[in-house]
Amino acid sequence: MNNRREFMKKTAILGMGIAATPQFGFTASQSEEKIVEAIETRPKVLFFDVNETLLDLTAMKESVGNALGGRKDLLPLWFTTMLQYSLVTTVGGQYNDFGIIGSAALQMVAANHGISLTETEAREAVLTPIRSLPAHQEVKAALSRLKAAGYKLVSFTNSSNIGVETQFKNAGLTAYFEERLSIEDMGKFKPHTDAYKWAARKMGVAPEECMLIAAHGWDIAGGIWAGWRGAFVSRPGAQLYPLAPNPEINESDLNLIADKLIAIK
């Protein structure tokens, strides 16, 4: 615990603590001890992103890569295009299933690179594999440990209700979670601030009592800006957004995050 307190003091000095942690409701003039006290308090609800955080996207990436004529170098562009147009949809006051946006983005990327791809082929490349993705190797053990330690686990995803229900059944994750929250029920994709506020209200907790666990820097940034705490799963290729406050936990897999959360008494 002393090491943890020392870490928080150092991050406060670097501007990632007192000055850059509005999620705890403290101003720069208040003491670092209050920041440390907040960090050492257990969050009431752990909200988990689903795709890549819990589920291994390898099969979907292979399917999308094949649809792009083997151009796996285009996968990052496809994903960022999908995220971009989910935000365009939200800002425009519209809503479409995240998977459908993903298939539309795939058509756009294909067209820009001279690859022939029909709407049906694009949807099949995205929607078929995404519903049967396996969990990452350490996920079930980590979730079991967190439940045994008394944490309330809730999934929180941009995917549709039927989509995440099917994913969890196929991956064997259903029993670990008390609730499954989909932004389909409120119509604004993460990282819109309203999405996080809605999820906190649904669970009857204050923003500072929520912790988001995610493998996407944009998701962690959105959660922190909405007043949540954060734990980043730094899977290969994942990066935090440098212009957002750092989350209090940053580890390479869910078991290591579970270790730190279970240590909070």
Image (cartoon, rainbow, N blue to C red):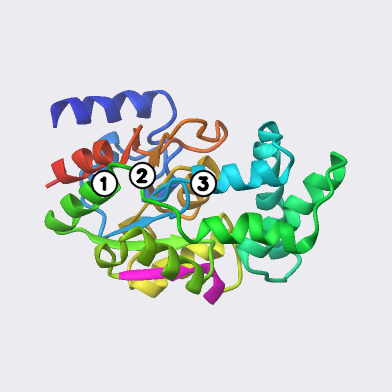
Report helix, strand or loop for mark 2.
Answer: loop
The reply to whether callout 1 and callout 3 are in contact (CB within 8 Å) is no
Q: Is residue 236 visible?
A: yes
Q: Mark 1 points at which residue?
A: 38
**CA neighbours of label 2 inside 10 A, class few (<14), some (14 to 19), many (20+):** some
Residue 4, quarter of picture: top left
Asked if labels 1 and 2 touch by Cβ distance under 8 angstroms, the answer is no
Q: Which residue is drawn at 54% across and 61% down?
A: 158
Q: Residue 119: percent from the left, percent from the top?
A: 78, 62
Please name the residue shown 55% across and 48% down the image: 60
- Which is nearer the eye, 233 or 20? 233
Q: Marks 3 and 2, Cα distance to the nearest angstrom? A: 12 Å
Q: Name the residue under label 2.
A: 136
- The verdict on residue 34 being magenta is no
| Whether residue 80 is visible | no
Q: Where is residue 233 in the image (x, y as percent from the top left)?
A: 39, 39
Residue with the mark numbered 3: 59
Cα distance in 3D space between marks 2 and 1:
30 Å
Q: Nearer the viewer, residue 85 or 130?
A: 130
Q: What residue type is labelled 1?
A: Ala
Task: Identify whether 119 is placed above or below 149.
Answer: below
Q: Which amino acid does label 2 sit on?
A: His
Q: What stretch is highlighted in magenta?
A: 179-185
Which residue is at 26% across, 43% downward?
A: 39
Q: Earlier in the sequence, mark 2 or mark 1?
A: 1
Q: Position of residue 111 (x, y in %)?
A: 85, 47
How many dots with numbers?
3
**Residue 167 in the image: above or below residue 83:** below
Q: Which of marks 3 and 2 is in front?
A: 3
